[in-house]
Image: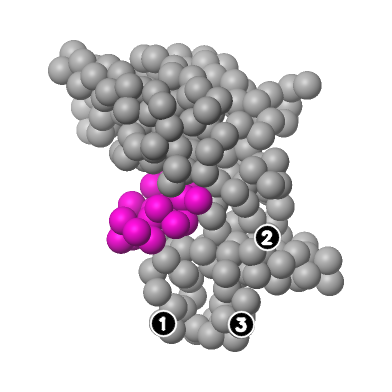
Amino acid sequence: MLPVVQLKGVTHAYLGDREASLAVEDLNLNVEQGEFVSLVGPSGCGKTTLLSIIAGLLQPSEGEVFVNGQPILGPSPEVGYMLQQDYLFPWRSILDNAVLGLELTGSINEESHKRTLELLREMGLEGKEHAYPSQLSGGMRQRVALVRTLATNPGLLLLDEPFSALDYQIKLQLEDLVSETLRSRGTTAILVTHDLSEAIAVSSRVILLQRNPGKIRKVFPVPELIRSAPPLYARDQPGFAELFHEVWTEMEIAGRES
């Protein structure tokens, strides 16, 4: 079976007034079906650039990107992208916001509408369908944003620090909810985060990038005992603190060397 994501020799440079700046260089990575992979590293290591390339929002300067064996030459319905901000339209109801992606892709029908309602229920938003974003908390709004992304049934979900603006308690609750939802659906996911604890708690692998230019420095497999537990309880599992310290130490070294 082909990997869901394949990066082959991906390099990307941003052009300035006088010179080009390499954001990422010669990145090679496979992400398998059902994996939850986290990208961590110091600021400026190209994490978000890499997500934008996988999403088809940026074309790499060199190299190739494949999702489910198909080259990514632009935005694809196979890929869902969830950002830090929820970007809900204030004049649309929660249900109308949730089906926006379906409307834009021309795929709204009875089946997809039913799937969206089921997702809202799974996210604890049953009874909120006709409310408006201003009536919901930040955590609830992010749940709506996740439903909007999952409603189009993407095979790959990209998450760019979606919980970083939330209170810690809400953040932990959403980590558990998102992790369980993706596992139950077999959805492949790539998360960008600055929170090492979060990265380890939700992932099957943690990929550390270094900067100047962005490259894969080291890949940390997450032990089965940790990754099989809900994120909240994963932090209490044997080996979690040791893995956190290992990733943190390597990231500190990478930061000093770049």
The percent position of residue 173, horizontal first and vertical second, equals: 44, 57
Start-end of magenta stretch: 159-176
Contact check, label 2 and label 1, Cβ < 8 Å = no
Q: Nearer the viewer, mark 2 or mark 3?
A: 3
| Residue located at (32% from left, 22% from top) | 242
Quadrant showing the N terminus: top right
| Residue located at (44% from left, 17% from top) | 219
Residue 110 position by quadrant: bottom right
Counting other residues with Cα less than 10 Å from the Cα at mark 1, is it few (<14), some (14-19), or many (20 or more)?
few
Report whether residue 213 is seen.
Answer: no
Residue 120 position by quadrant: bottom right
Disc tally is: 3
Say which of 218 and 17 sits in front.
218
What is the spatial separation of the Cα atoms under label 2 and label 1, in whole angstroms? 22 Å
The residue identified by callout 1 is 134
The residue identified by callout 3 is 127
Q: Residue 169 carries which label?
A: none
Which mark is first along the chain, 3 or 2?
3
Judged from the image, the secondary structure of the residue bearing numbered disc 3 is: loop
Say which of 48 and 131 sits in front.
131
The residue identified by callout 2 is 151
What is the spatial separation of the Cα atoms under label 3 and label 1, in whole angstroms? 15 Å
Which mark is first along the chain, 1 or 3?
3
The residue type indicated by label 1 comes to: Ser
| Residue located at (54% from left, 67% from top) | 144
| Residue located at (57% from left, 34% from top) | 228
